[in-house]
Image (cartoon, rainbow, N blue to C red):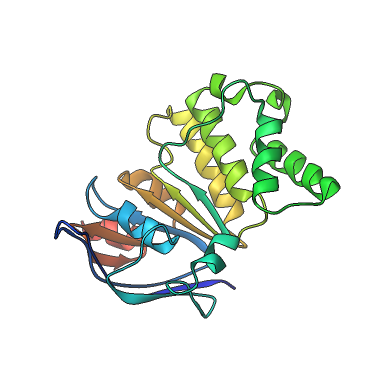
Amino acid sequence: MNTLKINNLELTYKNGYQAIQNISLEITNGMFGLLGPNGAGKSSLMKTIVGLQKPTSGSIGFNDVDIVSNPDYIKKNLGFLPQDFGVYPKTSAYSLLNHIAILKGLGNKEERETQIQYLLEKVNLWDFRHKEVHTFSGGMKQRFGVAQALLGKPKIVIVDEPTAGLDPEERNRFNMLLSDISNEVIVILSTHLVEDVKNLCSEMTIMNKGQILKSGKPKELISEL
């Protein structure tokens, strides 16, 4: 079982804007929803968890390792799907995953090939493996994003606004895929869509203006609303 513990986290940017205000959370395996409008501080929290920026105060522990002072530990165990990600033009899905796998430290060619095939089949893109990723539809690109996030068998996967711009059918397919992988790992889903959290997550937190408004089980929180 993986555990992410956040205690009294604060983040104030150089211009004086306080993006995160006294946040404490404990997250274990499964789907965890982070719900809030744009500008609620969700992305600031994500970037702080993954070690892209240091908090002003407070602590973050992942599997009992302090990842504020040791951000490499979470990076080694992390799959990250940002809201927008670029891809190299003229590169096929297979070649790009192979390149990312090498960057993630998967040096063994056989192991790499097995993992890439497994993931492309899992996200339903094996038949398109020789197609250039920049020609993919929005939904296909997001599914490719999940495949790259799962390379190297991460213990925590963070997805930021993943279903924005997807049609309902693609959204359902994408959400089922996330749900499927969340049995063995922590999946943190950041979104402003109540529907995504309600259908997928066992636990959730509502954020606004850098603060936690409420935490609990989605069905209970939504029925209260």
Nearer the observer, 1 or 69: 69
Nearer the observer, 96 or 149: 96
Find residue 224 and report its horizontal and vertical position in percent: 22, 60
Q: Is residue 4 above or below residue 96?
A: below
Residue drawn where x is 43% and y is 29% of the image? 166
Residue 132 in the figure: left or right of residue 113 = left
Question: Which residue lies most toward the front here?
Answer: 14
Residue 207 in the figure: left or right of residue 87 = left
Q: In this view, does 78 lie above or below 70?
A: above
| Residue 8 in view, yes or no | no
Residue drawn where x is 68% and y is 39% of the image? 99
Q: In this view, does 11 lie above or below 109?
A: below
* Location of residue 203 by image quarter: bottom left
Question: Which residue lies most toward the left here?
Answer: 16
| Residue 197 in view, yes or no | yes
Residue drawn where x is 54% and y is 31% of the image? 87
* Location of residue 94 by image quarter: top right
* Quadrant assignment for the C terminus: bottom left
Find residue 9 and report its horizontal and vertical position in percent: 29, 72
For the image shown, how many numbered marks are present on the structure?
0
Question: Which residue lies most toward the right here?
Answer: 110
Find residue 78 and report its horizontal and vertical position in percent: 55, 58
Residue drawn where x is 41% and y is 63% of the image? 49
Question: Which residue lies most toward the bottom here?
Answer: 64
* Quadrant assignment for the N terminus: bottom right
Find residue 138 and report its horizontal and vertical position in percent: 48, 26
